Image (cartoon, rainbow, N blue to C red):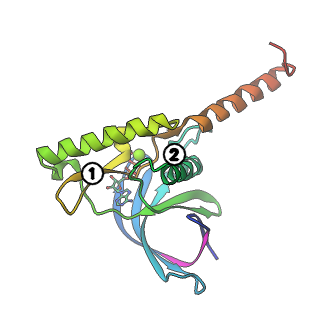
Amino acid sequence: MPVLEGGRKPIRVKRIMQGQLLGWGAEGNVSEVKVKLAAREKQRELALAEKEFNPNANVHEGYPFWNPEYQFKAMRKLQALNREKKLGLRIVPTIRLRRREGAAPTLLTTRLPRVTMADLTREQMRQFMQDVRRQQKTIERVGFKADFDSFMPQIGKDGKAIAVLFDFGNVFDRSLTTAARNSIISRIKNKLGFKQGSR
Ligand SMILES: Nc1ncnc2c1ncn2[C@@H]1O[C@H](COP(=O)(O)OP(=O)(O)OP(=O)(O)O)[C@@H](O)[C@H]1O
Ligand SMILES: [Mg+2]
């Protein structure tokens, strides 16, 4: 039975039904999905968005782009920090990873109502940009970095625009990136026959 990793614990899935294409980009296609949960789970069904990564992707260790495993790991850390330290980041509430045999894992996230920059008034655009910058500063303060295009605008009940972190292809976790760089350097040193501790 397929399992979606993440959340408080993994959930077991009976069936995943793919709906309409929500959008696409360099990383791959994003579709709406209905997830039917196993009989023993509390909930019956989830409506989410699923990103299927381009199969020809050239994944680089320590780099989030095209790398669902990195994105999942980094975002789980950022979500936990956000909760524990009350950082005020607006991260999509659901982030889950689906491993598949013979294919790259997919990422499932909360399905957001479609809002693009073109839908915003000047005032809403200002509010959106301000919210992006506020969150980017906070994200940097805790050792991460997020691009402008990681955020999607959403309109609140009061008509104000906010920014929601939804695309993790350009969200860097500096500690993951440094660890990967160090491991690559030590592998190269090993190959070249450097002894531990030598220059
Ligand atoms: N959680 C979601 N809810 C609703 N729509 C989504 C969601 N995730 C992605 N989309 C739609 O799919 C499009 C592509 O998603 P995304 O930007 O994450 O892909 P990408 O391959 O990283 O693209 P890019 O190269 O532009 O970064 C988005 O612009 C948006 O319209
Ligand atoms: Mg992207």
Q: Residue furthest front?
A: 85
Q: Which residue position holds label 1?
A: 162
Q: Report the quarter where the C terminus lies.
A: top right
Q: Nearer the viewer, residue 52 or 14?
A: 14
Does residue 85 sit above or below 176 in this rendering? below
Q: Amino acid at mark 1?
A: Ile
Residue 56 on the magenta span:
no
CA–CA distance in space, label 1 to label 2: 26 Å
Q: How many marks?
A: 2
Magenta stretch secondary structure, dominant: strand
Mark 2 element type: loop
Amino acid type indicated by mark 2: Trp
**Circle 2 Cα neighbour tier, 10 Å, few/some/many (<14 / 14–19 / ≥20):** many
The quarter of the image holding the N terminus is bottom right
Q: Is residue 117 left or right of residue 43?
A: left
Which of the two residues, 12 or 21, is positioned nearer the viewer here? 12
Give residue 104's position: percent from left, percent from top.
58, 56
Q: Position of residue 183 (x, y in %)?
A: 72, 32
Between circles 1 and 2, the one closer to the viewer is 1
Residue span colored magenta: 10-16
Q: Give residue 112's position: percent from left, percent from top.
A: 33, 62
Q: Is residue 12 magenta?
A: yes
Q: Secondary structure at mark 1?
A: strand
Give me the residue at 46% from left, 35% from top.
Answer: 140
**Quadrant of the image occupied by residue 97:** bottom right
User: Which residue in the structure is indicated by mark 2?
Assistant: 66
Residue 136 to residue 162: above or below: above
